Amino acid sequence: MKTLIKNGLIIDGSGKPGFKGSLLIDGDRIEKIGDVAESGDMKVIDASGLVVSPGFIDTHSHSDVQILLNPEILPKVMQGVTTEVLGQDGVAMAPLPEQYISPWRKNLAGLDGDSDKIDWHFKDTAGYLSMIEKVGPGINECYLVPHGNIRMEAMGLDNRQPSPEEMQKMRDITRREMEAGAMGLSTGLIYMPCAYGRTEEIIEMCKVVAEYDGLFVIHQRSEADTILESMEEVIRIGRESGVRTHFSHFKVCGKKNWDKIDKVVALLEKAEAEGIKVSFDQYPYVAGSTMLGVILPPWVHDGGTDKLVTRLHDKELRKKMVEDIENGIPGWDNFVDFAGLDNIYVTSVKNKKNENAIGLSLTQLGELHGKNPYDATFDLLMEEENAVGMVDFYGTEEHVRRFMKRPEMNACTDGLLGGKPHPRVYGTFPRILGKYVREDKALKLEEAVYKMTTKPAETMHIKERGQLKPGYFADIVLFNPDTVIDKGTFTDPAQYPEGIDMVMINGKTVVKDGKHTGTRAGCVLRNGHVSK
């Protein structure tokens, strides 16, 4: 039976003005848009008072573990996300050689979580994507192959540079994973072992990605004191490899760095004038979220999580850690410096005994245990084997709006799903529509929808999605423009938004009247170069 959505304001994702009309769906595809005659053999949905939009695309997601455990991914689908991109920050699921399963699970836990319920012997991207297909994903899933995983397979977890043979192995692994369907390559140059890689290493891998017209997605080496030098590095990678380049969760951290914003924008424009393809994603909040272990100096991470925990047991090494945090290390993004102990909050742990730390700042953590904040934090990281999430406050609403208006920008959540998460996990897309469109008028409605749908689809090369168009897949959101808003706060983040009335994925209704139907209708999306 065909489905007719009538009387809605159709905003097709292209950026063009919306128009009142109807949309006809046949199976998993859109058949017709505009003036469609109603007939008795159609299922009819009256969208009066609602916007009919393409499904939202989250270009920076951390559902990599959760998709195998709770495949509905409710925090995303309930806010209108129909497609998300996994494999972020250079530290994700695959490839994962057998001998590295144990240390890698520990390295991954603070970012994406961990579970004994998963069979970790999937080996590579092909195996991981096959596992997602077997569980039946609730939404559409794409994957970026992570730099850190590639480096680990080629040369282990140590802080050293690759031999020529190891560099060739990294190129070969990159090619293998692109052939398995990865949409591109990710790195996170504040995370180990990615941070050990020099610019030249990344350029060589990106040359392979460019052959497939894939995307290079980067958490750059600095979003704070050395952000300008960091951006120059990213632009150089794009220039010398020819790869399309995408900055993750773009921002400038720390009050003392806010005067760099004009120069940051100038570098974007310089790259584009040079013909380097540059884009970025952004979440609409003044606080970020990652694993708490990033506050530790880079040398503490050498050799992986087990060695990190050993170093945290050493009182003399702790003194050196505090010294480096207090004084800084050139080129290292020092979260304590730009956010402060008062503005970094624990969001997740894996052990029940430490759940009383969730929601506390590092200063409050010290008060809870009657210790200085550093020792209390080091003890927590040691006991949790580095599997601790955090939120850090770093920016202003003015800066959020300025980057949001940039032509390179598309929306993302970048949400860690464990513990007490950042509210962006539940609210990114409704927040843009409610706060930044309706209340602040920072964007027009059509412009915001474009940045959530067509723009990310074009950036990620996601075919036949991201726009309402005959022949495209029926990934569709119906929302109320007068009421849509995020509800989660930093103290109570796990709240579904208001105003998301209906969500369809591949022509199937997964959210109806603001409630999940229990249907899982997603699929794995691969690049167009997969070997047959």
Image: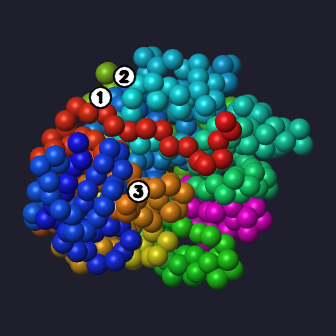
Magenta region includes residue 60: no
Q: Which residue is mark 1?
A: 355
Tell me the kind of residue under disc 1.
Answer: Glu
Res. 395 in view? no
- What span is in magenta? 219-246
* Label 2 element class: loop
Q: Where residue 314 sits: x, y (%)?
A: 59, 28
* Kind of residue indicated by mark 3: Gly
Q: Quadrant of residue 300?
A: top right
Decide: few, some or many residues near mark 3? Use Cα within 10 Å; few <14, some 14-19, many ≥20. Answer: some
Discs 1/3, front: 3
Horizontal and vertical percent for residue 370? 32, 34
Residue located 33% across and 56% down the image:
31
Find disc 2 in the rendering and name its residue.
351
Counting other residues with Cα less than 10 Å from the Cα at mark 1, is it few (<14), some (14-19), or many (20 or more)? Answer: some
Cα–Cα gap, marks 2 and 1 = 7 Å
